[in-house]
Image (cartoon, helix red, strand yellow):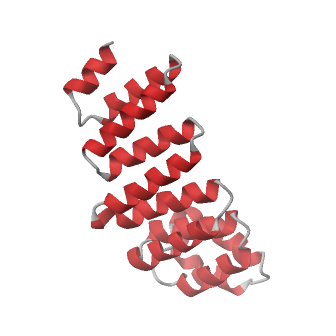
Amino acid sequence: SILKRLSDEEPNSAQYREAYTSALIANGQAEEAQKSLAEWAAARPVEARYTLLAKQQKRASRFADARASYLKAAEVSDPSRKLEAQLALAEYDAERGDSSPQEKALGEFFAKRKDANAFRRYLSFLQADGFPDKAYEFFLVNREKGFLEQYSANEYVTLCLDHSDYQTPMDVSWQFA
């Protein structure tokens, strides 16, 4: 098969490996695909390989294996990517019904990064996952720290109005003018 040859010739290519694994699964060879991908990840233990393995295991409904692979990805990740890898694990856990690790991971991510993207991710999570009061408090504490984005003004106004706060939207409106 062409995909096998390509993945063997270019062992570092995650794209070829993912295509080969998907082709095996489509041909009813899921066990062989999972085994091959696990061996590939173990041969050179890096975050990207274990993340790919976890995604394929998740698609195959091998949830315990997928969690173990996400955990391994976080373990072997580069220190500069450690937060992202831990966040991927927390997001996986949240998909399985436990959102507390994701909330904690996003809070830590924001605390370390202190940028508009981290602010937005954490605030969106709080709003979407049923923590409106915590989202509002988080917004109030960080509203003047340069994290507000011009295109999101309506969301911030709605968040404040939902808490009967009419003054804050007027106080921050200058940032969106």
Closer to us: 64 or 106: 64
Closer to us: 142 or 133: 133
Instruction: Give the farthest residue toward the left.
Output: 9
Q: Is residue 171 visible?
A: yes
Residue 174 place in picture, x, y as percent = 54, 78
Q: How many marks?
A: 0
Q: Is residue 76 left or right of residue 169?
A: left
Q: Is residue 177 visible?
A: no
The residue under the point 77% across, 80% down is 163
Task: Judge whether 96 appears above or below 86 on screen.
Answer: above
The residue under the point 31% across, 37% down is 40
Q: Quadrant of the C terminus?
A: bottom right
Closer to us: 24 or 99: 24
Closer to us: 130 or 152: 130
Q: Is residue 63 left or right of residue 89?
A: right
Residue 129 place in picture, x, y as percent = 69, 64
The residue under the point 39% across, 26% down is 19
Residue 10 place in picture, x, y as percent = 21, 29
Task: Judge whether 134 appears above or below 63 on screen.
Answer: below
Task: Judge whether 86 appears above or below 157 on screen.
Answer: above
Q: Quadrant of the N terminus?
A: top left
Q: Is residue 10 left or right of residue 69?
A: left
The residue under the point 71% across, 78% down is 160
Task: Judge whether 3 appears above or below 71 on screen.
Answer: above
